[in-house]
C-alpha cells in the first residue's frame, strides 16, 4: 500500500524500490517511488516516463504506460509490499531524476 499525501489513507499501486540493495539499516522498511498511470504527470525532471513499447519497459511488469515519480517518495514496511512485478534493467534515468528531486547537483 502506497500512502496518500494525507498519510491517513493508502492505495494499492505499483511502486519502484529506490534504495540500495545493501542498505541494511536494520529496519524492515523500504523506500519507494510512486508509479502512476496518469501520463499528464510526465513533464517534470523528477519523473521518468515508462512506455510499454520500449523493450526495457516490458521487464517492469507494468500493465500500462506509466510515470515513475521520484518527487513522491514513501518509506513503507516490507510487509506492506504485496509482490514483485518485475525489474527495471537500468536505474540511470531514475537516478538522475532522484538527484533532481533531492537537489544533488553532482550525481
Image (cartoon, rainbow, N blue to C red):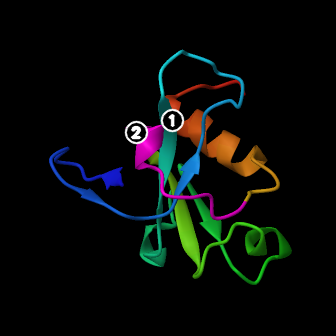
Q: Residue at x 77, y 69 (%)?
A: 59
Residue toward you, 10 or 80: 80
Q: Is residue 37 above or below residue 83?
A: below
Which element type, helix, strand or loop, lies under badge 2?
Answer: strand
Q: Residue at x 64, y 21 (%)?
A: 23
Residue positioned 76% across, 75% down in the render: 58
Q: Position of residue 73 (x, y in %)?
A: 43, 42
Q: Residue 13, can we see it? A: yes
Mark 1: which secondary structure?
strand
Closer to the camera, 106 or 67? 67
Q: Which residue is mark 2?
A: 76
| Quadrant holding the C terminus | top right
Instruction: Kindly identify the residue that appears in the image at 61 percent across and 45 percent down.
Output: 97
Is there a contact, CB below 8 Å, between mark 2 and mark 1? yes
Q: Which mark is residue 30?
A: 1
Dividing the picture into quadrants, the one containing residue 71 is top left
Image: 90 above or below 56: above
Graded by Cα atoms within 10 Å as few (under 14), some (14 to 19) or many (20 or more), the crowding at tag 2 reads some
Q: Which residues are magenta?
A: 74-86
Amino acid at each position: 500500500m502506497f500512502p496518500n499525501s494525507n498519510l491517513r489513507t493508502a492505495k494499492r499501486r505499483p511502486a519502484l524500490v529506490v534504495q540500495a540493495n545493501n542498505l541494511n539499516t536494520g529496519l524492515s522498511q523500504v523506500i519507494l517511488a510512486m508509479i502512476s498511470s496518469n501520463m499528464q504527470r510526465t513533464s517534470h525532471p523528477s519523473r521518468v516516463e515508462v512506455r510499454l513499447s520500449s523493450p526495457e519497459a516490458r521487464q517492469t511488469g507494468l500493465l500500462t504506460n506509466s510515470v515513475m515519480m521520484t518527487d513522491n517518495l514513501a518509506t513503507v514496511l516490507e510487509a506492506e509490499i504485496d509482490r514483485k512485478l518485475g525489474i527495471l534493467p537500468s536505474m540511470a534515468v531514475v537516478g538522475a531524476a532522484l538527484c533532481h528531486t533531492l537537489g544533488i547537483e553532482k550525481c
